[in-house]
Amino acid sequence: MLSVRTATPQDAEAVAGVHVRSWQVGYRGLLPDDYLDGLDPDDRRARYTFGITGADQPSTVVAVEDGVICGFATTGPSRDADVPDAGELLALYVDPRAWGRGVGRRLVVDARERLYRSGYTEAVLWVLAGNDRAQRFYRLDGWRPDDRRQHQEVWGVTVDEVGFRRALP
């Protein structure tokens, strides 16, 4: 049975593993192989701030199936000056071993609901350019490209991203 709950500091190791594995599989062909092969969950784990609360702080939930964390989603206020009143889906990653089982769908629905309950009527997100799988997923959930593009350094590599947005709820 799949459940979703708020992430705790004790979840950092499992979330880091999901994060790295999803990048290594999902971004293969989009980012250099040597870069993806060198990703280390220990490097990622130290960056999480689970348990810190506040309206201006990111909030993370984890998807748990049979006692194992198989995905996570992080939401918060938009980081973009051009959409200051929007909420943002900052991250949504599912362990590749759980792809196609509804975990991502459950997480994105929960993320939208959390943003709406926080008072947002619009949400934005960024997707790696060329990540057709993710773009299809978000389009099926009602997100639309919004003509924003950015180059950003993420985990030590510069990526090209495209913006999406949708109305809430």
Image: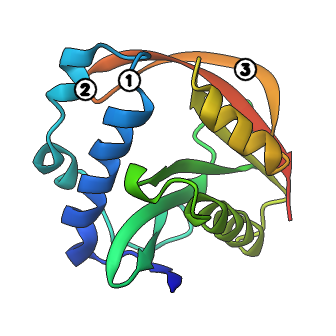
**Residue 154 figure quarter:** top left
Picture layout, residue 38 above or below residue 168: above
Q: Tell me if residue 139 comes above or below residue 169 in the rendering.
A: above
Circle 3 sits in a helix, a strand or a loop, which is it? strand
Residue 20 or residue 167, whichever sits in front: 20
> How far separated are the C-alphas under marks 2 and 1?
7 Å
Q: x and y percent of residue 69 in the render? A: 35, 71
How packed mark 1 is, by other alpha carbons closer than 10 Å (few <14, some 14-19, many 20 or more), is: some
Query: Nearer the viewer's eye, disc 2 or disc 1?
Result: 1
Q: Residue at x 59, y 58 (%)?
A: 104
Query: How did the renderer colour the structure?
Result: rainbow
Pointer 1 residue: 28
Q: Which residue in the protein does label 3 denote?
A: 148
Secondary structure beneath dot 2 equals: helix
Figure check: 32 above or below 42: above
Question: What's the residue at 24%, 51% (across, down)?
Answer: 47
Query: Is 5 on the left or on the right of 144, as rendered?
Result: left
Q: Is residue 44 left or right of residue 96?
A: left
155 left or right of 71? left
Judged from the image, the secondary structure of the residue bearing numbered disc 1 is loop
Amino acid on which disc 2 is placed:
Leu
Looking at the image, which residue is at 78% across and 61% down? 120
Instruction: Please state if 34 lies on the left or on the right of 76 as rendered.
Output: left
User: Nearest the camera: 5 or 9?
Assistant: 5
Evaluate if marks 2 and 1 touch, with contact meaning CB atoms under 8 Å apart: yes
The amino acid sitting under disc 1 is Arg
Q: Amino acid at mark 3?
A: Arg
